[in-house]
Amino acid sequence: TRSTRPQRLLKAVQKNATRGDPQSVISAIDHFCRHSEWAMNIGDEKGTILDSVVNELNPEKVLELGTYCGYSTVRIARLLPPGARLITLEFNGDYAAIARQVITWAGLEDRVQLVEGASEDWIPRMKEHFGIETFDLVFLDHWKDRYLPDTKLMEDCGLLRKGTVLLADNVICPGVPDYLQYVRNSLSYKSCYFKSHLEYTKAEDGLEKSVFLG
Ligand SMILES: Cc1cc(C(=O)N2CCN(C)CC2)sc1-c1cc(O)c2nc[nH]c(=O)c2c1
Ligand SMILES: [Mg+2]
């Protein structure tokens, strides 16, 4: 039967990227998505904004909601000091299987814990299962209908501390209007918008960076 797009993306990484070289994995995926098949990775333009937020924060504990093929997982993990940890949640088992191989090809498996399951099931278990008190950075990139409920769930589970940064992808395209309205009007957040473009296209999209004020 025909291969899937994530399988073809992994093949492109294994063919064109150097094992243990995260930048070559990022470049191989961007080349594949620009010249062969579009795929919903954050991409190089919004990825540069993600890089700058990670470099500014120097986070020890990072949570990523939505792994897909592991592109943003690699982008974030390559910037973390070896003691830091990135936990990434992926609901789709096929995506998770590909992402594990992409993360390993990049040589970043020691800093990344990929968990297969639903965000609403795992967010309440972060403390007892992973020994995490609070996160320094949360990257929301899973499903537009989950951004707001999962943010409220993280608040309720005490996973956000004064200064925790929420960075959300796709706030324009596909769009998360209920989430935007919440973080931009809540007294518990200081929010700002980074205008950019939908990965590998000319369509507008952007990232919303929201600092939790406690
Ligand atoms: C699947 C999809 C289709 C989009 C689109 O407008 N398209 C028109 C233009 N053509 C070229 C591509 C397709 S945008 C998008 C998308 C993009 C992300 O970054 C996502 N991140 C996390 N979770 C998502 O569900 C997610 C969906
Ligand atoms: Mg996205």
Image (tube, rainbow, N blue to C red):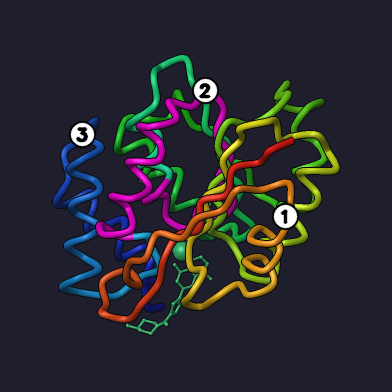
Q: Is residue 57 magenta?
A: yes
Real-space CA distance between mark 1 and mark 3, rounded to the nearest whole angstrom: 30 Å
Relative to 54, say whether 60 is above or below: above
Residue 60, disc:
2
Circle number at residue 118 = 1
Q: Amino acid at mark 2?
A: Glu
Q: Nearer the viewer, mark 2 or mark 1?
A: 2
Q: Residue furthest bottom?
A: 203
Location of mark 3 (residue): 21
**For the residues bearing labels 1 and 3, Cβ distance under 8 angstroms:** no
Q: Which mark is residue 58?
A: none
Q: Residues within 10 Å of mark 1 (few under 14, many from 20)?
A: some
Task: State the separation of the CA atoms marked 3 and 2.
Answer: 22 Å
Q: Amino acid at mark 3?
A: Asp
User: In the image, residue 195 lies at what x, y percent?
Assistant: 37, 65
- Please provide the residue range marked out in magenta: 43-72
Quarter of the image where the C terminus is located: top right
Mark 2 vs mark 1: which is more N-terminal?
2
